């Protein structure tokens, strides 16, 4: 790494240290670019680049005419760039995303079984109804499916977990899953997976919820692996 990239990175690291130490906190205004450059011993150009990179990451925000401020540092903001992972992943990388989901979703669903409020369970049940029946279009089913899983993870009360889960979810891929299962005549299995997850949540049974979520993600993972194998696993898969 040459100096043009390492100096701004060191400056960004120093700003992050100021935030983590509590010297500046969420909503606080940073010293001016000039003052920071002098204090950290870097050029104003390097400091400007450091601020720009931290702004892109959701750590800082520039307010026109008012200076640069630390954001609220919400997990959803800090992980916003991560949220494109599942949307743009293809082939074997997408399979890896599903493998990570298989590690996270069952544990999150088990936690939801212990923590979800009655109101949150009703919301999850409403989404299940939208997945299950009625005159819903496939697009509406895909939206309800995404909402179902996101509502479950949100009910854990862990905002960081919810943001990570959202980053591992993809509307485009979800539509592909439903279309592929419809063509194979297996959408009933997907719907049954959701019903079993919901039943475990209603029963406040974390282990049953964990098992049901694991089965569901593994079903989708096996489907994708078979599809990739059938297409040769190429970059367009």
Image (tube, rainbow, N blue to C red):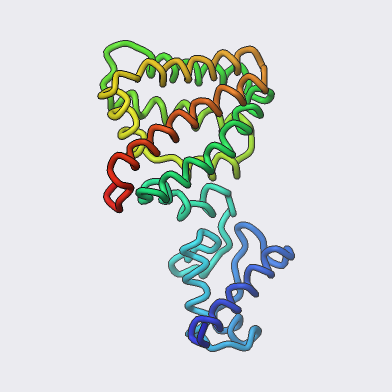
Is 89 above or below relative to 48?
A: above
Q: Depth check: 17 or 213 in front?
A: 213
- Examine the rendered structure and indicate whether residue 133 appears above or below residue 162: above
Q: Residue at x 60, y 24 (%)?
A: 211
- Answer above or below: position of 92 versus 4: above
Q: Position of residue 184 (x, y in %)?
A: 29, 23
Name the foreground residue: 210 vs 119: 210
Give the left or right position of residue 34, taking residue 19 as reference: left
Q: Which residue does the image show at 57% across and 49% down from the upper left?
A: 75
Q: As rendered, which of 204 and 181 lies closer to the eye?
A: 181
**Number of callouts in the render?**
0
Above or below: residue 65 compared with residue 77: below
Q: Position of residue 103 (x, y in %)?
A: 59, 39
Q: Residue furthest right?
A: 21
Comparing 124 with 23, the one in front is 124
> Residue 228: which quarter of the image?
top left
Left or right: 13 in relation to 185:
right
Q: Residue at x 65, y 75 (%)?
A: 14
Image coordinates for residue 224, horizontal then vertical, percent: 38, 37
Name the residue located 53 percent from the left edge and 68 percent from the top edge: 68
Where residue 181 sits in the image (x, y, percent)?
32, 25
């Amino acid at each position: 790494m040459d100096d043009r990239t390492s100096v701004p990175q060191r400056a960004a690291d120093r700003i992050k240290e100021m935030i983590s130490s509590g010297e500046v906190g969420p909503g606080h205004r940073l010293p001016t670019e000039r003052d920071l450059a002098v204090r950290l011993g870097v050029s104003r150009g390097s400091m400007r680049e450091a601020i720009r990179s931290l702004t892109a990451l959701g750590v800082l925000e520039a307010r026109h005419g008012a200076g640069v401020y630390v954001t609220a540092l919400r997990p959803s903001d800090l992980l916003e760039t991560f949220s494109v992972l599942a949307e743009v992943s293809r082939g074997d990388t997408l399979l890896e995303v599903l493998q990570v989901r298989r590690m996270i979703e069952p544990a999150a669903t088990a936690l939801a079984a212990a923590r979800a409020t009655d109101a949150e369970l009703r919301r999850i049940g409403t989404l299940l109804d939208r997945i299950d029946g009625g005159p819903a279009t496939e697009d509406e089913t895909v939206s309800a499916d995404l909402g179902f899983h996101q509502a479950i993870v949100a009910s854990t009360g862990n905002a960081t977990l919810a943001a990570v889960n959202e980053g591992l979810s993809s509307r485009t891929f979800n539509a592909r899953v439903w279309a592929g299962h419809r063509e194979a005549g297996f959408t009933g299995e997907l719907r049954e997976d959701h019903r079993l997850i919901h039943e475990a949540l209603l029963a406040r049974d974390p282990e049953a919820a964990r098992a049901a979520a694991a089965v569901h993600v593994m079903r989708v993972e096996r489907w994708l692996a078979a599809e990739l194998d059938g297409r040769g696993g190429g970059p367009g898969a």
